[in-house]
Amino acid sequence: MTIQTTDTIRSITAQSVPAHQAETLTGGGNLAHITLGDQIYTLRITRAGKLILTK
C-alpha cells in the first residue's frame, strides 16, 4: 500500500496539467477572451487578484 501526501498529489497534478499565467493570457491587462468550440468566454482579473470566467 502506498500513502500519498498532499505534496505528492500536488506534484503529480502539476506535472500532468498544463499551467498558464493569467497575466500572460490577458497580455498584461485584466481581460482575455477564451474560445471553446463556438463559445466565447471572458476571463477577468479583479482588483483583488481573483479570477472570474463568464460566458
Image (tube, rainbow, N blue to C red):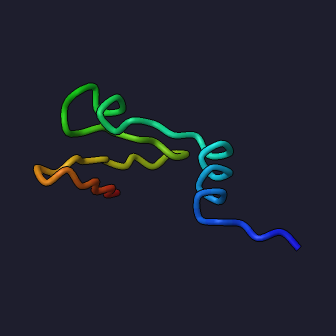
List the single residue furthest toward the right.
1
**Which is more toward the observer, 2 or 10?**
2
**Which is more toward the observer, 43 or 3?**
3
Q: Is residue 17 above or below residue 32?
A: below
The residue at 51%/40% (across/down) is 19
Using residue 28 as the reference point, say whether residue 16 is left or right of it. Answer: right
Q: Is residue 22 above or below residue 12?
A: above
The residue at 83%/69% (across/down) is 2
> How far from the left and from the top, in percent, is residue 16?
68, 45
List the single residue furthest toward the left.
47
List the single residue furthest toward the bottom.
1
Q: Is residue 23 above or below residue 46?
A: above
User: In the rendered view of the protein, which quadrant contains the N terminus?
Assistant: bottom right
> How far from the left and from the top, in percent, is residue 35?
45, 42
The residue at 55%/45% (across/down) is 37
The residue at 37%/49% (across/down) is 41
Quadrant of the image occupied by residue 28:
top left
Q: How many marks?
A: 0
Using residue 48 as the reference point, say whether residue 34 is left or right of it. Answer: right
User: In the rendered view of the protein, which quadrant contains the C terminus?
Assistant: bottom left
Using residue 21 as the reference point, say whether residue 28 is left or right of it. Answer: left
